[in-house]
Image: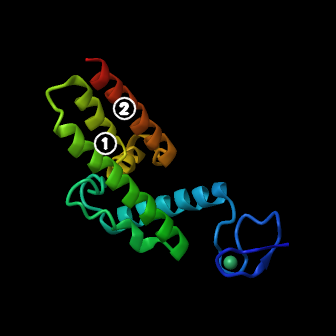
């Protein structure tokens, strides 16, 4: 037996979710729950706002917390928000720094990277793909652009 880090009840070692509070016990379970919630949220959003083409307008307005209202567990919300906040900080920080370097080629790569890590962009990847790209993919894109951009800034 092990103990749920969230509610401290005893749960099976192999359990992926806590039987008492539902908290995911593995990274994979957390990711899976996360994707499930986002799918459900999209479904709800599409059903509720069945206006026009069903393309829910999440890109505009900056109200990125619309989906969080459907999230059932606090833990997920915290996780989500932490990630989101980190992504915004990293994304905007990178873009702001890059803008000061802008005539140089590397700056444009840094800007692309900064944009790639912003949560609404990740959400947009759900449209063609069915489910959003994993955060790790977006973070990887960000890192790739950042490294390339920095290399170009250094070399040119
Ligand atoms: Zn628990």
User: As drawn, is 104 to the left or to the right of 64?
Assistant: left
Q: Please, what secondary structure does the residue beneath circle 1 have?
A: helix
The mark found on residue 114 in the picture is 1
Residue drawn at the location 36% of the way across and 34% of the way down: 146
Q: Is residue 134 visible?
A: no
Q: Does the residue tagged 2 have its C-beta within 8 Å of any atom of ligand 1? A: no
Q: Is residue 41 above or below residue 125?
A: below
Residue drawn at the location 68% of the way across and 74% of the way down: 5
Is the residue under label 2 in contact with that under label 1 (CB below 8 Å)? Answer: yes
**Residue 18: quadrant of the picture:** bottom right
Quarter of the picture holding the N terminus = bottom right
Q: Which of these two is toward me, 151 or 28?
A: 151
Q: Position of residue 45 (x, y in %)?
A: 36, 65
Q: Which of these two is toward me, 121 or 27?
A: 27
Q: How many marks?
A: 2
Q: Please, what secondary structure does the residue beneath circle 2 have?
A: helix
Quarter of the picture holding the C terminus = top left
Q: Position of residue 63 (x, y in %)?
A: 26, 64
**Residue 109: quadrant of the picture:** top left
Name the residue at the left extreme.
103
Q: Which of these two is toward me, 17 or 87?
A: 87
Q: Is residue 18 above or below residue 111?
A: below
Q: CA distance from mark 1 to mark 2?
A: 8 Å
The mark found on residue 133 in the picture is none
The mark found on residue 145 in the picture is 2
Crowd around label 1: few <14 · some 14–19 · many ≥20 (10 Å): many
Q: Is residue 62 visible?
A: yes
Q: Is residue 32 above or below residue 109?
A: below
Name the residue at the front extreme.
154
Residue drawn at the location 65% of the way across and 66% of the way down: 24
How are the residues colored?
rainbow
Query: Which one is earlier in the sequence, the residue at label 1 or at label 2?
Result: 1
């Amino acid at each position: 037996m092990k103990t749920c880090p969230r509610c401290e009840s005893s749960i099976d070692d192999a359990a992926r979710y806590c039987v008492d509070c539902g908290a995911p016990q593995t990274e994979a379970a957390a990711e899976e729950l996360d994707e499930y919630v986002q799918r459900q949220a999209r479904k709800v959003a599409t059903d509720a706002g069945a206006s026009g083409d069903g393309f829910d307008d999440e890109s505009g307005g900056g109200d990125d917390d619309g989906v969080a209202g459907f999230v059932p567990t606090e833990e997920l919300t915290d996780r989500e928000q932490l990630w989101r906040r980190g992504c915004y900080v990293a994304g905007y920080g990178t873009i702001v720094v890059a803008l000061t370097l802008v005539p140089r080629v590397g700056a444009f790569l840094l800007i692309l990277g900064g944009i790639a890590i912003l949560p609404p962009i990740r959400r947009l990847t759900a449209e063609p793909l069915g489910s959003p790209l994993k955060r790790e993919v977006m973070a990887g894109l960000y890192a790739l652009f950042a490294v390339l951009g920095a290399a170009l800034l250094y070399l040119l």
